[in-house]
Amino acid sequence: MSEAFPGGVRDPEGRRGFVTIAPNRVAAVDLADGKLLWMKDEAGQPIGATGEQLITIGHGKDGPVIRIIDAASGGESKKIADPGLPDWAGREALAGEALHIDATIENGELRLAWKGGQPYRGGAAPTNGIIAESVAGTAGGVFVDLASGRISQVPSGAEAAVPMAAPESPQDFATLAKSIPDAVAMSRVGDRIFVLRNATLPGNALRIEIEARDARTGAVQWQTSLAEVNRGRPTPLRK
């Protein structure tokens, strides 16, 4: 299943984290020392990772697109169009709206699960009944054989066959968050807490940073700048 990480996902061993720093742009970070490993445009949004591969979702002209990317180098190893997800899934996942997608790879098989609903798009504020209808029945899963490309739908009601990660609660980091006002996301891995920050710069610009802190003391162990955002356009920093 996917492992929580600020702004994206990490691998199960906690070696690498993958962060979305702009739509379709992903940065990979070595979690031991904060080294920026690679940065990739047109990558989609991270939804799962193994020790060797990153799984992302994007949206092509015909619907969702899944990419499998080498975790160490950032090279794309496989692209799967029409993976059996709802046709709006790629757009909503990238927008960070009412859809959670989980992904893993086991024994040469890509396993995808989703839960949520296409957000209501009406002009007036939706009633509770409309909200309930818009999210009802929107859980599902697919298995994709990576060798043959064969896609198998998970039978209705059996989505539990594709494990989904439990989201972390903001209350888990309430005390630390008070001391880091520009933090936008946090996640704990063992004895460390990883923090994604939007640091304010002169001229109304922002620097996107990821840092590791000691979970007991809150002391910063390392900090890495990923991009600077000025006038709505992110600029990757030189490695």
Image (tube, rainbow, N blue to C red):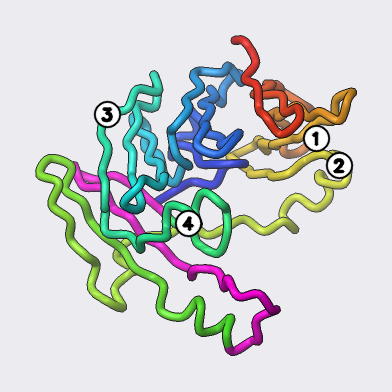
Given the image, on which type of amino acid does mark 2 rest? Pro
User: Which residues make up the magenta segment?
Assistant: 102-129
Mark seen at residue 165: 4
Q: In terms of depth relative to the viewer, which is nearer, 89 or 105?
A: 89
What kind of residue is marked 4? Ala
| Along the line of sight, the residue nearer the viewer: 72 or 96 | 96
Q: Residue at x 51, y 49 (%)?
A: 94
Question: Mark 1 belongs to which amino acid?
Answer: Thr
Seen from the viewer's position, the closer of residues 222 and 44 is 44
Judge whether 138 appears above or below 43 on screen. below
The mark that comes first in sequence, 1 or 3, is 3
* Drawn side of residue 19 relative to residue 191, left or right: left
- Give x and y (percent) for residue 107: 19, 44
Q: CA distance from mark 4 to mark 1?
A: 27 Å
Q: CA distance from mark 1 to mark 3?
A: 41 Å
> As displayed, is residue 6 above or below residue 160?
above
Residue under pointer 1: 217
Indicate the quadrant where residue 197 lies: top right
Residue 113: x, y in percent?
36, 60
Q: Say which label, 3 or 2, has the lower sequence index.
A: 3
Q: Nearer the viewer, mark 3 or mark 2?
A: 3
Q: Disc 3 marks which residue?
A: 77
* Neighbourhood count class around disc 4 (C-alpha, 10 Å): few under 14, some 14–19, many 20 upward: some
**Residue named by callout 2:** 181
Q: Earlier in the sequence, mark 1 or mark 2?
A: 2
The residue that appears at 63% across and 43% down in the rendered structure is 188
